Image (cartoon, rainbow, N blue to C red):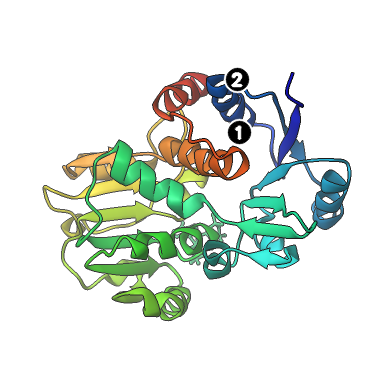
Amino acid sequence: MAQTRKFAVFGNPIKHSKSPLIHAAFAEQFGHSLEYRAVRVELDGFERAVRGFFASGGSGLNVTVPFKTQASDLADIQSEHSRLAGAANFLVLDEQGRIAADNTDGLGLVRDMVVNQGWLLQGARILLLGAGGAARGVAGPLLQERPHSLFIANRTAHKAAQLAQEFGGLGDVRGGDISGIEERTFDIVINATSTGLSGETLSLAPALLNERSCCYDMVYGPEPTPFMRWAAQHAAWAVADGAGMLVEQAAESYFRWYGARPETAPVIRRVRDALG
Ligand code: ATR
């Protein structure tokens, strides 16, 4: 029988993580023997926990809030995605025992939008709401899809301008104040602010949407977020939450660990069932 490989997701808080369920479902598809744990790591103990995990034979780690920046900082090797994002959600030991970091969040978002939802990113006018870690993690992969343009809008405008400058080499990227977005309508609007988690409402002009606009909230839960409700009320063509992104970013991790690409649709359904 094949040896059981050990994986984990490190975060704080971590209790509600769906990653163990997702990876167990992937392993079932291939008959892989895998142990995947959700581990709550002390806020000042991340690096120690990572090194301890690999020293004790761990095969690979996922990293979630609030450790993604630290994960990228402690790595010996960075992928292009984690370097651009300044954050990593994936760590693995390479053959020389070096810690290699990657970031699969943006790829997960793009895959969910393009493959699962059928949205066209190429040539699209994209509005990205937020300029924190979540927005930074997805800007690069969004731009690699060659949209017409990417407008990053944030409550604190200078952070959006800063992000736009950093990613400007990858396409037509602008940044500005969320309450004064100058472009009229967008094909794709992505909420990468933390309002989906806090339940706060963003104040957005309905004129941002047209009848073909697709709206995506990167968070997920049993109920639609305020942003999703806003989009539906203003007749967006399609509205989605981040459950698909969650499963797709996990599938990207799984692919890196096992070289096998799991089927995601049944696992997205299982995550939805588990959300209640
Ligand atoms: P994350 O890692 O989830 O991105 P973060 O780095 O703390 O978390 O960033 C949170 C993002 O949500 C920021 O863009 C923040 O805007 P500011 O930079 O102005 O703080 C945005 N955000 C949070 N609450 C918000 C609110 N009530 N209205 C608008 N934007 C909000």
Q: Nearer the viewer, residue 112 or 13?
A: 112
- Residue 231 placement: quadrant: top left
Type of amino acid at the residue the image marks with label 2? Gly
**Residue shown at the point (36%, 67%) measured from the top left:** 153
What number of labels is visible?
Answer: 2
Q: Position of residue 252 (x, y in %)?
A: 51, 44
Q: Is residue 212 left or right of residue 63?
A: left
Residue at 54% x, 41% y is: 255
Instruction: Determine crowd level at label 1: few under 14, some 14-19, many 20+ residues with C-alpha closer than 10 A.
Output: many
Comparing 77 with 213, the one in front is: 77
Which residue corresponds to the image point at 31% horizontal and 74% vertical from the top-left? 171
Graded by Cα atoms within 10 Å as few (under 14), some (14 to 19) or many (20 or more), the crowding at tag 2 reads: few
Where residue 222 sits, quadrant-wise, is top left
Please report whichever mark, 1 or 2, sits nearer to the chain's N-terminal start: 1
Above or below for 114 versus 178: above
Q: Which SS class for mark 1?
A: helix
Taking the spot 60% from the left edge, 33% from the top edge, the residue there is: 19
Q: Quadrant of residue 146?
A: bottom left
Front in this rendered view, residue 8 or 65: 8
Q: Is residue 250 left or right of residue 2?
A: left
Dot label at residue 19: 1
Residue 31's tag is 2
x and y percent of residue 67 in the render?
69, 55
Q: Secondary structure at mark 2?
A: loop
Image position of 48 (left or right of 160)? right
Distance, label 1 to label 2, CA atoms, is: 18 Å
* Residue 31 appears in the rendering: yes
Q: Quadrant of the N terminus?
A: top right
Compared to residue 169, the image places residue 151 above or below, namely above
- Spot occupied by residue 133 in the image (x, y as percentages of width and height): 55, 61
